[in-house]
Image: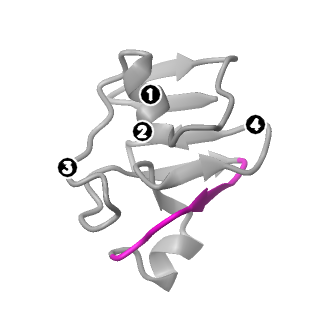
Amino acid sequence: MEAELDGENFTFDDYSGKETVLEFLESKGVPAPFSCREGNCSACACVVLEGDVKMAHNEVLDDLDLADGIRLTCQATPITEKLRISFNG
């Protein structure tokens, strides 16, 4: 998994996908943004640049957001082996 946040790049090779993207990043000390953790606010939104995720819940992203690759990390788990995301929009 690779994540870009505030100009920093983070790379991890031990993400099993059993926890959400947000939970994993937090466990690694990455200061990923979040607020509600329930898929209701979009504070944790990222853009998926490579790979794909499934979201358990989504109350805020519309079809255009989803088409642009925007996903909620608090609800996202990977469905591909490789995942590259950016919080920098």
> Is residue 47 found left or right of 30 in the rendered image?
right
Residue type at mark 1? Answer: Leu
Q: Quick check: 35 above or below 28?
A: below
Q: Nearer the viewer, mark 3 or mark 4?
A: 3
Residue type at mark 3? Answer: Ser
Q: Name the foreground residue: 28 vs 64.
A: 28
Q: Residue at x 54, y 68 (%)?
A: 68
Q: In this figure, which residue is indicated by the disc labeled 2?
A: 22
C-alpha gap between disc 2 and disc 3:
11 Å
37 drawn magenta: no
Tell me the element at label 1: helix
Q: Nearer the viewer, mark 4 or mark 1?
A: 1
Q: Position of residue 16 (x, y in %)?
A: 69, 29
User: Residue 28 lies in what quarter of the image?
Assistant: top left
C-alpha gap between disc 3 and disc 4:
26 Å
Q: Are marks 2 and 1 in contact (CB under 8 Å)?
A: yes
Q: In this figure, which residue is indicated by the disc labeled 1?
A: 25
Q: Quick check: 75 above or below 11?
A: below
53 drawn magenta: yes
Residue type at mark 4? Answer: Lys
> Is residue 71 found left or right of 74 in the rendered image?
right
Q: Residue at x 27, y 68 (%)?
A: 40
- Tell me if mark 3 has few (under 14), some (14-19) or many (20+) residues whose alpha carbon lies within 10 angstroms of its own: few
Task: Please identify the residue farthest to the right as the structure is shown.
Answer: 81
Q: Position of residue 75 (x, y in %)?
A: 46, 55
Q: In this figure, which residue is indicated by the disc labeled 3?
A: 35
- Tell me if mark 1 has few (under 14), some (14-19) or many (20+) residues whose alpha carbon lies within 10 angstroms of its own: many
Magenta stretch bounds: 51-59
Task: Please identify the residue farthest to the front as the structure is shown.
Answer: 18
User: Residue 30 lies in what quarter of the image?
Assistant: top left
Instruction: Say which label, 3 or 4, has the lower sequence index.
Output: 3
Q: Which mark is residue 82?
A: 4
